[in-house]
Amino acid sequence: MIYFDNNATSIMDPQIAARMFDLNQQGLANPSSQHRFGRIARQLVEDARDRILAGVGACTRGMSTDQLLFTSGGTEANNLAVFGLTHNRPGAIVVSAIEHPSVLGAAEKLETEGRKLVRLPVDRNGLVDLSTLERLLINSETQPIALVSLMFANNETGVIQSVAEAAQMCRERGVLVHTDAVQMLGKESIAFQSIGVDAMTITAHKLHGPIGIGALVIRNGVKLDPQLFGGFQQLGLRPGTESPVLADAFALTIERFSDIETRRSYLAEIRNEFESCLRESVPQAVIIGASSMRLPHTSSVAFPGLNRQAIQVALDLGGLACSTGSACASGSSQPSHVLAAMGLPRDIINGGLRFSFSHNNTLDEVHRAVAIISQVVSRLSNTKQSAFSL
């Protein structure tokens, strides 16, 4: 089976799995316990926190130290950012129309409670229109904005957004900015301090780490209201017993894959070979967002005239794992909100699939995958033509 669905989750790295096994064998205690075993567990958690902050270019020392709150994953971190950063701040919520469902869903929940929600449009290349944001910010004195949430790179198309530029615009108006950098981590360089955002979501399992842990990085001095209650852990901002094993594994994940340039080069080689071969074998295939700066491991491809779910199932049966879009929306019959927001034709939206690669994938897998896709597309196209002729 060829696995090209790494944007949904990536296969855990053996060294990280081995480290987790070793720690679990030690029988670690609750990190909130005051005895020796608890203090050992607490040290693991706090060391991991510092290692992750350093790994994403946040400030880890002195009076301006940034915060990192461990969560159960990217969805919880995104929800915590949207709800926690806006709770006591009046004004609209501004998000891009192509955000992950965990951001859009949280923003839409606030909309039902009376908050104004503004969705920033995107062009046909998948780029967010920052001129719309600029106009909103110009009017922010009379029409306040509580938060802008703009994802760093789209999980379906891989298109990278101008987050630092947006953050600069917002900072000049005193507006908070959050970015979902889940797909960005480990594929492109991230420097939290330089980007200029106030909060950033990351998670481990998109980078060969464990499922079940994510984090929200928060700029020093930014106030966040908790959304969970009943505990004092993590300063009460995200209560609940932290997992020393998962925290340590998250930190090790970032450290294991810190050689961004080497990985980016290899992933880009894999993706470019895949798209080049696919264009030759399936000329009608459309590479979405190809003219934009994209993550090196993501390829959004449409097969006009075919049904994305039918293709995905057929590819799975043929030995190739891919997806029809965000894993959080899998199983839904609704078309991709990302491709729809880009204003693409319906036949492209309906025929869109996502292929996402890792350093574990090989050029041989690429060539075999293209052969499988070519066979499936040919068979489905012939079946459709036969149905029309009847």
Image: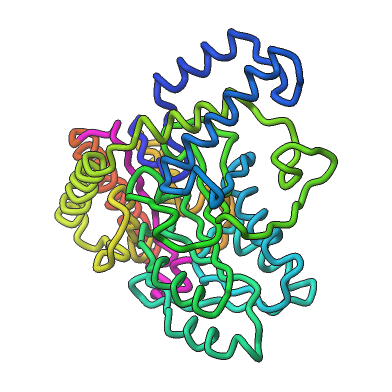
Residue beneath the point at 44% across and 22% down:
16
Residue nearer the viewer, 295 or 214 = 214
Can residue 330 be seen at all in this image of the molecule?
Answer: no
Q: Measuring from the top left, give residue 200's x and y in whole percent.
A: 52, 54
Residue nearer the viewer, 292 or 285 = 292
Q: Quadrant of residue 147?
A: bottom right
Residue nearer the viewer, 187 or 306 = 187
Q: Measuring from the top left, give residue 38's x and y in whole percent.
A: 70, 18
Q: Measuring from the top left, give residue 56's x and y in whole percent.
A: 43, 46
What's the colour scheme? rainbow
Q: Quadrant of the C terminus?
A: bottom left
Q: Measuring from the top left, give residue 334's x and y in whole percent.
A: 57, 62
Residue farthest to the front, as pictured? 62
Residue beneath the point at 52% across and 11% down:
22
Residue nearer the viewer, 92 or 99 = 92
Using the image, determine if residue 325 lies above or below residue 260: below
Q: Quadrant of the N terminus?
A: top left
Using the image, determine if residue 351 lies above or below residue 322: below
Q: Quadrant of residue 367?
A: top left
Residue beneath the point at 65% across and 73% down:
146
Using the image, determine if residue 378 lies above or below residue 3: below
Numbered label tally = 0
Is residue 53 toward the left or the right of residue 306 in the image? Answer: right
Q: Quadrant of residue 82?
A: bottom right
Q: What residue span does the magenta drawing correspond to? A: 337-362
Can residue 138 be seen at all in this image of the molecule?
Answer: yes
Task: Examine the structure image and report whether residue 252 is included in the region drawn in magenta.
Answer: no
Task: Examine the structure image and report whether residue 347 is included in the region drawn in magenta.
Answer: yes
